[in-house]
Amino acid sequence: MTQKSTISEYTELEFLNFIKSIINPPDNVSDQELDAQIMVFKALSEHPNGSDLIYWPEAGGLDTPEEILRIIKEWRAANGKPGFKPE
């Protein structure tokens, strides 16, 4: 996936796939590469919980890629942040 600099450059599906690549990385991804992806996730989402959305969700069931995407989308809308690129 090509690295993009803002969340509004991603469609929801592209960002969902990005989240999935962090949660279930390919075997050939190094720890350093995964750490870099996590930093990009935090910067793009701008959510105050950052990577905790993935690794330490507030409640059970909120750790699926789809729920993480929903939480980010709702938080961004509630805080006047730009959304995703249309499909």
Image: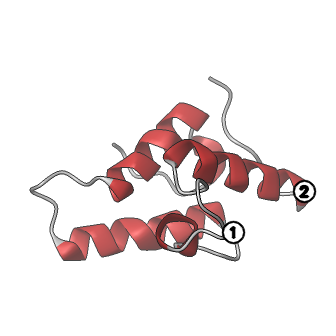
Task: Report the quarter where the C terminus lies.
Answer: top right
The residue closer to the viewer here, 77 or 61, is 61
Q: CA distance from mark 2 to mark 1?
A: 11 Å
The residue indicated by pointer 2 is 78
Say if residue 11 shows up in the picture.
Answer: no
Classify mark 2: helix, strand or loop.
helix
The residue indicated by pointer 1 is 47
Residue sitting at the far top? 87
Residue sitting at the far left? 28
Which of the 4 image quadrants contains residue 45? bottom right
Going 59% across and 73% down the picture, which residue do you hit?
Answer: 50
Q: Residues within 10 Å of mark 2 (few under 14, many from 20)?
A: few
Which of the numbered marks, if any, corresponds to residue 19?
A: none
Image position of 58 (left or right of 56): right
Q: Residues within 10 Å of mark 1 (few under 14, many from 20)?
A: some
Percent of width and height locating residue 12: 60, 36
Percent of width and height locating residue 53: 58, 67
Residue 81, relative to residue 10: is it above or below? below
Residue 1, relative to residue 26: is it above or below? above
Going 34% across and 72% down the picture, which residue do you hit?
Answer: 36
Could you tell which of marks 2 and 1 lies nearer the N-terminus?
1
Task: Report the quarter where the N terminus lies.
Answer: top left
Classify mark 1: helix, strand or loop.
loop
Percent of width and height locating residue 20: 39, 47
